[in-house]
Amino acid sequence: MKPLKNTIPIRELQTLLRQWRRKGLKEAALLKVLELYLGLPNYMNEQGEYPGHFFYDLSISLKFRTVTMMLEAVKLSGSFGWKSGDNRMNVVSFHSPIWKETTPMPANIPADLHANLQVGNNIINNNDIPAELNPQEEGKKFFHEINIHPTEKAEVLEPLIRYFQQQEAGVPREEACVDVVYLVNELLIPHFIAQEKFLRMKHNGRLAWLKNLLKSAHGKELMKRAAVAGRQRRVLKQQKEQIEVILNNRPLSPYEWTEPKSGIRFYEDELEGRVMIPEDAPPRPSDTAFWNVIQKSWNEI
């Protein structure tokens, strides 16, 4: 999949941004819509469109508060192609003219998408779904049932654990399990509950959908994101542990610490922050003592 244009003149972009401002797009939304306009291929299909099943992930990636707000911003810009459909949103997909030839937006799109979108992240037809069903709880319940069913756990969760162990050498099983939990809670459940058919499905239908998703390009992208998040979490954890080792290394005084490799001494001051202690200074006598560089001695506040 390649864009129709590889370059855009700066003057053309400036004109476009001015037009969007005149149409009422707020500054906070301008750059987000511009990103959609320039193209985010990871959220496109082979036709260069942003399909409905990516709307939730797109809105999260661009930090829109809801899918509704993203679609309203896109519609307000007037710069995107728009494919309407027989669903609650009246939108099957939209696309940028940089990636696909654009036809004018159909006139039957509601002026206020809030009329066709449920406020929030979940696009649900309330006429077909029992009112007592909570989408988030249904998502958690679905994966809990997989986890307690030995066969389903072996078919779905165990391969995911092995996948995360293979992404990074030396990752223990318990860490890979944490990566799976992140994938489920932060990526898979939001993906499912953003689509109205999820609440209408029985468990077996949801399970088949999940298996197909994990084999798809989008599913692999979600797994890759979870793996990256896991690596970042482990790096931060390691850094925190290293800092704790340094801060707990207090051979001379309980009120100062020594960097193990360099032997440099430090203490924490409320006003100055971290302060280096001269090598020949006596041990810091108290938690309120500060080093007087002129007198070359510890003074009390």
Image (tube, helix red, strand yellow):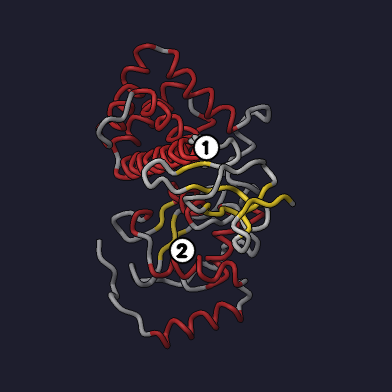
Residue 128, quarter of the rendered image: top right
Label 2: state its secondary structure: strand
Residue situated in front as seen by the camera: 77 or 214? 214
Q: Mark 1 and mark 2: span between their CA atoms? A: 70 Å
Q: Does residue 16 lie above or below 225 as drawn?
A: below
User: What residue is rendered at 45% in x and 13% in y?
Assistant: 148
User: What residue is rendered at 58% in x and 33% in y?
Assistant: 135
x%, y% of residue 11? Answer: 42, 88
User: What residue is rendered at 55% in x and 77% in y?
Assistant: 20
Is 269 left, or right, of 300 in this rendering?
Answer: left
x%, y% of residue 49? Answer: 37, 59
Looking at the image, the residue that sits furthest to the top is: 150
Label 1: state its secondary structure: loop
The residue that mark 1 highlights is 252
Q: Earlier in the sequence, mark 1 or mark 2?
A: 2
Q: Amino acid at mark 1?
A: Leu
User: What residue is rendered at 54% in x and 82% in y?
Assistant: 19
Q: Nearer the viewer, mark 1 or mark 2?
A: 1
Residue 71 seen in render: yes
Residue situated in front as seen by the camera: 265 or 152? 265
Instruction: Count up the numbered dots.
Output: 2
Q: Residues within 10 Å of mark 1 (few under 14, many from 20)?
A: some
